[in-house]
């Protein structure tokens, strides 16, 4: 009864205005209703670790604001995958960036803002390294060009030996 009440209360906060009919098969619910029901059930269970995939999908602004507040107050760990940058900025304390090409995971502190700062710094570092590489390449090219005459004066084949025959 207590868990059911928590789910119903959470469903209301997530934008489900009327209680869902418990006898209704899940397959007859809309995609948004199923999404909100799953999120409400997870939140009502109050687990230590919350794993959320696009939690703001199917939520109106009021429900998103409530969810943000609820997640900030969560006593455990929340891992959320989301493309909702405003949500991430308001909720995340750290961002984990998965680099599929390099098979690496990088942690950026200070929430989504810290992630943006870190990415900008990384981009600036790569641009600087690229410019340094171009400068070095130009130096080597100039060095090769200044000594090309000396290199071309080196005979490619030794003269044939006099056999005296």
Image (cartoon, helix red, strand yellow):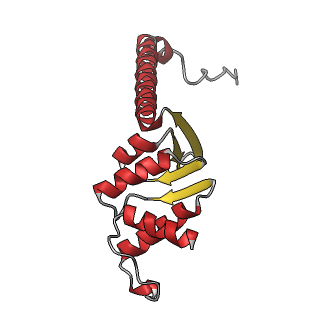
Residue 126 appears at what percent x and percent y? 45, 28
- Which residue in the rendered view is the most extreme toward the front? 1
Tell which of 134 and 44 is nearer to you: 44
Q: Write the residue at 41% across / 34% down.
A: 113
Residue 6 appears at what percent x and percent y? 51, 66
Q: Is residue 150 above or below residue 97?
A: above
Viewport quadrant of the N terminus = bottom right
Q: Is residue 38 left or right of residue 56?
A: right
Residue 46 appears at what percent x and percent y? 58, 58
Residue 83 visible (yes or no): no
- Which residue in the rendered view is the most extreme toward the left? 61
Q: Write the residue at 44% across / 15% down.
A: 148
Q: Is residue 83 above or below residue 45?
A: above
Q: Is residue 115 above or below residue 103?
A: above
Q: Is residue 7 left or right of residue 65?
A: right
Tell which of 133 and 28 is nearer to you: 28
Viewport quadrant of the C terminus = top right
Tell which of 141 and 137 is nearer to you: 137
Tell which of 133 and 49 is nearer to you: 49
Q: Write the residue at 53% across / 72% down.
A: 4
Residue 88, picture quadrant = top left
Q: Write the residue at 52% across / 46% down.
A: 99
């Amino acid at each position: 009864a207590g868990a059911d009440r928590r789910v119903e209360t959470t469903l209301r906060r997530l934008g489900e205005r009327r209680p869902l009919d418990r006898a209704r098969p899940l397959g007859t619910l809309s995609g948004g209703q199923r999404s909100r029901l799953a999120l409400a059930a997870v939140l009502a269970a109050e687990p230590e670790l919350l794993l959320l995939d696009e939690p703001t999908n199917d939520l109106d602004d009021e429900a998103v604001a409530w969810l943000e507040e609820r997640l900030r107050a969560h006593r455990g760990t929340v891992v959320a995958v989301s493309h909702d940058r405003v949500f991430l900025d308001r909720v995340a304390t750290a961002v984990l960036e998965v680099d599929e090409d390099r098979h690496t995971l990088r942690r950026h502190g200070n929430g989504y803002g810290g992630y943006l700062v870190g990415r900008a710094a990384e981009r600036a570092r790569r641009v600087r390294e690229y410019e340094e590489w171009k400068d070095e390449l130009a130096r080597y090219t100039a060095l090769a060009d200044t000594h090309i005459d000396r290199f071309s004066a080196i005979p490619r084949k030794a003269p044939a030996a006099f056999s005296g025959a």
